[in-house]
Amino acid sequence: MTNGVTRLAPSPTGSLHLGNVRTFLINWALARQRGWRILVRIEDLDAPRVRSGAASQLLAMLSWLGIDHDDHPVCQSSDLEPYRRAMLTLAGRGLAYHCALTRSEIQQAASAPHQGQQELRFPPNLRPAASTQPLEFARHDVNYRFVVPDESIRIEDQVAGLRSFSPFDEVGDFVVWTKLGVPSYQLAVVVDDARQGVTDVVRGDDLLPSAARRTLLYRALNLPAPRWWHVPLVLGSDGRRLAKRQADTRVEIYRRAGVPPQRIIGLLAFWCGAAKKRCEMSADEFRERFQLDTLSRSPVTFTQDDHAWLVQLK
Ligand code: GLU
């Protein structure tokens, strides 16, 4: 397969953990096996969470691991104009409106979240009546929400299979532009993937519901949607997904402790079904051995044995 384009899209909010790196490695191997071009996009629009120095640290980490890319990395914050244009299109089509409600006002109007549901759903009755609310994108310092239709969205995922979501029930009218003067994550990635010609998006399956939200935005903006490859996450022994705040799963900690990149890749290969047991291997060997068919469709758990093997404890 040729002419494919994918991207590694890290957020510079902390240092990479084993789960992040596993997703990047799978993304990279799929791309190199299929001849896709690999772009790097630093997703730095969430300014309060961005950590200075994190972007260069994570680029250095990828190259230490042997995960290369094509073209120069780009930062989302370097040019906001394409996102503003997308907002003008949405507003012009009557699909985005300005919303000054606070989180607690929305919370009061919303019903209690379902069990396990962390997101706050924006209740449909808070959407302004079209006649009283001029739909324009004139102010950049307020939140704008996207008009989410009440319908079910099917995602045909190359890894997770056919899945259905209802953004209307899950999240309601979500924010596409924030009062900090920047697009929300959902809008930014849609605009970027389209303008960078991304054909294949590979990422953790915690983002599967967001693929449905993005599908609505692609439709509203008349842009082609990419193919999706959502891979299962890596969980800690507590059953929760690894997080950048958990120091002991950061690859940087292992690197500083003298663990070679081949041992990290070898553990990831074991987790991905590309090795029968933990062993050392280079990224290039991983690329040769990795097959989507042998990738487990359920989450992987990072165990004490994995840690002990990485640091070679007896
Ligand atoms: N920047 C996002 C993250 O680090 C990834 C977004 C995406 O791959 O679409 O979670």
Image (tube, rainbow, N blue to C red):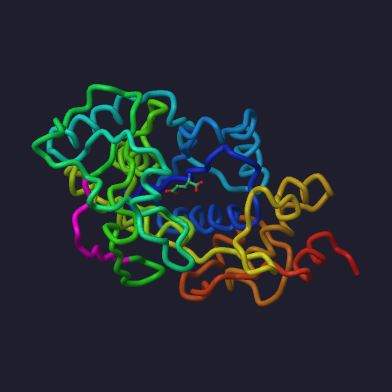
Compared to residue 104, the image places residue 163 above or below, namely below
Quadrant for the N terminus in the image = bottom left
Q: Nearer the viewer, residue 58 or 288?
A: 58
In the displayed orientation, state which residue is furthest to the left.
Answer: 131
What secondary structure do most residues of the magenta stretch adopt?
loop
Lateral position of residue 280 relative to residue 227, left or right? right
Compared to 226, does 140 lie above or below?
Answer: above
From the viewer's perspective, tell me whether residue 308 is left or right of residue 64.
right
Question: Magenta segment: does it hold 275?
Answer: no
Provide residue 266's location: percent of width, then percent of height.
69, 63
The quarter of the displayed image where residue 264 is located = bottom right
Residue at (83%, 49%) from the top-left corner?
Answer: 258
Q: Residue 201 at what x, y percent from top left?
A: 39, 53
* Tally of marks: 0
Nearest the viewer among 208 and 149 is 149
x and y percent of residue 261 in the render?
A: 72, 52
Q: Quadrant of residue 170?
A: bottom left
Residue 153 in the magenta stretch? The answer is yes
Q: Residue at x 46, y 55 (%)?
A: 203
Question: Outermost residue, right direction?
Answer: 314
Magenta range is 147-156
Rendering coords of residue 267 (x, y %): 69, 65
Quadrant of the rendering where the C terminus is positioned: bottom right
Residue drawn at (64%, 29%) of the image: 53
Please name whichever residue, 112 or 81, is drawn nearer the observer in this view of the structure. 112
Please report the residue visible at 66 percent of the width from the left and 57 percent of the height from the top: 282
